[in-house]
Image (cartoon, rainbow, N blue to C red):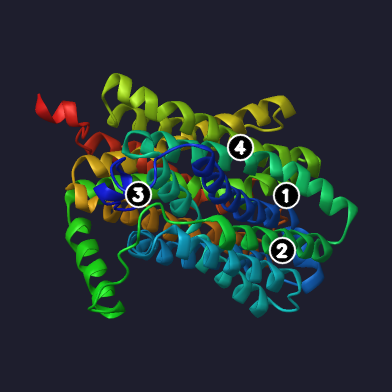
Amino acid sequence: MNNLSVCKLSKSCGPPVGGGKAWWIWALGVTFVVFLFSFQTGYSASNLRVQGDLGLSISQVSMVAAVYTWAFAVGQFFSGALLDRLGAGRVTPIAISLVTVGIFLFANAQSFEMLLLAQFVIACGACCGFVGAGFIGGQWFGLAKYSIMFGLVQVVASTASSFSQVFINLGLEQMHWRVFFNAWAMFGVLLTLLAFIFIRNRVPATGLGKEGFFAFLKSVVQNIVTVGKMPHIIIVSIMSATTFATWLSMGIIWARRLLESVHGFESGWANLGGSLIFLGMAAGSAVIPKISDMIQKRKPLMIIGAAIQLLCLVALLYVPAPQLSTALVICFLFGLGSSCSMLPFSSAADVVKPDQVGTSAAIVNGVSFILAGFMMSRPGVIIERGIASGVEMGLFDIARNAAMPLLLCAVVPVVLGFFMKESYPVAQLR
């Protein structure tokens, strides 16, 4: 989410909002989000194959995913400002190009270092994907529909990610992972061409200004520091980061490992469980913001969602030999509770000035992805230590030890939520 000017979102500037052209441009932006999200979830379905072919350790597999997340997080702090200054017409096609090049590098990687480079390149483009689709929705559909269109991006992206994992797994069973991801990158080439041809700014972009890039960079950093010092921003950023990091690390890597290696389910069912975590996030993202507006509160929903996430994680770890149907339902509920991580964006926007909304969102999103990168890699390190000490990976004790960082992370938003002040604008006026 970025700081869009009134002109960029209003109906009074540029071509009319809405219509077939707007939907086509928005569809290309959302397709980019699905393209890159599906690749990352596809990595989670293929990481065992990649690990075996390249001789990687468990911690190296986790680090490959974590490097993407960290690079993505840093890029998040600047992507919104770049879109404000240059517009989606200039930023989005280049972003798609970077992701496509990165996937080609990934598909042809021959070493751990090349995998890290591929993930870094992908992240440089991906940081403009989700926020770019939101920018397009705000620019081409107007201020009144900005929140609706942005929420629709989240619903489409999470739903597509959940189902793409199943189809990607089927594809990987039919062909080598290198062949599969080279074909995936070819689709990226097509999407890049369509983006360069069709994606345009609805109103002219302002550019970086006469002062140049370094002055622009300085202004972004100063704004981040000003907003980042606000106590409420600190609290909601931590709540969002801990909830989101637990969800992403489980959805991308550890839910499948837990269901397959610890509970003994077949890989296909384990992948379905991971998909349901994304589907739960999509379902929650579609309804929780609306419920928040109906009851005019943020705080209780954030606490309840975090509590559901924590209880589901405890159930997956401490309920011995669960039924398959029970485990799958828990995975869906885990994702549903995790969708409360979207509310901190609204809560942060409630307490800042209109021209600081983009910065507040960048802080919340950036902190979330930085912590998520750590949480994806940390369990792998603990597992390797357990294996080195002679404990088999499939035993419950090592699974619980490895998941301890996730459990601690899931506890934080539940506790911290009680210290958070209600931020909904109506509540502030009472």
**Upstream in sequence: badge 3 or badge 2:** 3
Q: Which mark is residue 185?
A: 2
Badges 3 and 4: C-beta atoms under 8 Å apart? no
Disc 2, SS = helix
Q: Position of residue 114 (x, y in %)?
A: 66, 78
The numbered disc on residue 159 is 4
Q: Which residue is drawn at 32% across and 39% down?
A: 143
Q: Which of marks 2 and 4 is nearer the N terminus?
A: 4
Quarter of the picture containing the C terminus is top left
Q: Position of residue 139 (x, y in %)?
A: 38, 47
Q: Give the amino acid type for the residue marked by disc 4 in the picture.
A: Thr
Residue at 48% in and 45% down: 407
Looking at the image, residue 110 lies above or below residue 335:
below
Q: Which residue is labeled 3 in the image?
A: 14
Q: Is residue 168 above or below residue 327?
A: below
Question: Cα distance, mark 2 to mark 4?
Answer: 21 Å
Numbered tag placed on residue 394 in the rendering: 1
Which numbered mark, 2 or 1, is in the foreground of this view?
Answer: 2
